Image (cartoon, rainbow, N blue to C red):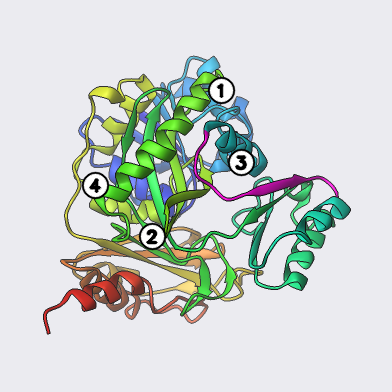
Amino acid sequence: MNVLLLGSGGREHALAWAMSASPLLTRLWCAPGNAGIAKVATCQPLEIADHTSVIEFCREHRIDLVVVGPEAPLVAGIADDLRAAGIKTFGPGKAAAQLEGSKGFTKDLLAEAGVPTGAYGRFRDLAAAKSYLARQSIPIVVKADGLAAGKGVVVATTWEEAEAALTACFSGAFGAAGAEVVIEEFLDGEEVSFFALCDGKSVLPLATAQDHKRVHDGDKGPNTGGMGAYSPAPVTTPAIEARIMAEIIRPTVAAMAARGTPFQGVLFAGIMVTASGPRIYEYNCRFGDPECQVLMLRLKSDLLAALLATADGVLGTFDLRWRDEPALAVVMAAEGYPGTPRTGTEIKGLDAAASADGVEIFHAGTVREGDRILANGGRVLNVVARGATVGEAQRRAYTAIDRIDWPGGFCRRDIGWRAIAREQKGKPS
């Protein structure tokens, strides 16, 4: 079958890499793609915000399935337009994508469905938001309602920080995304990224992962789109996973179906495992980045077959197999990230890095210029490794990173620290 993958990041490179191994695949295109994706797919310079152009390309090249990687086109309704044109698509329609496109929508849905989450308030003006804030306790979370590329969330530890976050949203720091604000109870616990494929009625849980949002070692500095991840997340025991499915995922899917907006695609739940059990703090309507990269390295089953089953609505008879070995991803970012990244710097040594045991390198923000690979974004590379333990996967990833010659880049050096601490604690003395 002919497949078109939309997107250009590390998530899309991992998806393209996994789909390229499928015996179902005839040809894989990616729009717009990047320098790494070009090794496993034909990159096409389509403007994916132009739905008409995407549809025309699909018709011209007889595309059998479109896989939508990023959230912005899903929130803009590209899946609806593709399906209306008779093109099979993996990804939720615009109404269902509100689970990521509007944090206020999601909080209201969770409250109606009785899903465990934090207390919250929704506001469209600064005065009302400040009045509500004054009656809450610190720490507290301030969120721009719409899509803000992972940068519209502030975990405020002081009143001044919380008020500054509100002022930033309402003064236009996040554009239209900040026109409405959600103020949410701070949940104390350990975060986990939980993924499930949904075909509108059936739900198939995937492997778990844990992300590292802060830019610097020791979870210091501002939040980012993610500086690294590992899978599985040890905090998610079988009992916790069962509760997440029963108390969070299945009620959400049922509530969306009851509204007449069934969710079809991958549901990404940000879960806080608290002392009283799992509670959800956010939903996303696509694979996580960099969580997708570690999931793809652990997946033994045919990814393309799973995405097709989701699009066809036959997940109820489907299952997936996973490698037991953990996987770990380290993000290499350009200097200046998560502010203004320094682009155009040359990256050398990628072939030597990729030759390290158990390592795959997924490109996130690169461009090829002749024989050179240049940085072309904030998060630029994902160095991913498997190992018998998280500690071994970490060592392999950093061994590969040390072979990369890129003075214009940086990375955290402590990815996986929670899981490694658990491994060390569990060793016999």
Which comes sooner in the sequence, label 2 or label 4? 2
Q: Are marks 2 and 4 in contact (CB under 8 Å)?
A: no
Above-or-below relation of 204 to 225? above
Q: Nearer the viewer, mark 1 or mark 2?
A: 2
Pointer 3: what residue?
107
Amino acid marked by disc 1 = Asp
Q: Nearer the viewer, residue 370 or 43?
A: 43
Q: Nearer the viewer, mark 3 or mark 2?
A: 3
Q: For the residues marked 3 and 2, what is the alpha-carbon distance in whole angstroms?
A: 22 Å
Q: What stretch is highlighted in magenta?
A: 114-125
Q: Do the residues labelled 4 and 1 touch (CB within 8 Å)?
A: no
Q: Nearer the viewer, residue 190 or 320?
A: 190
Q: For the residues marked 4 and 1, what is the alpha-carbon distance in whole angstroms?
A: 29 Å
Pointer 4: what residue?
299
Secondary structure of the residue carrying numbered label 3: helix
Pointer 2: what residue?
210
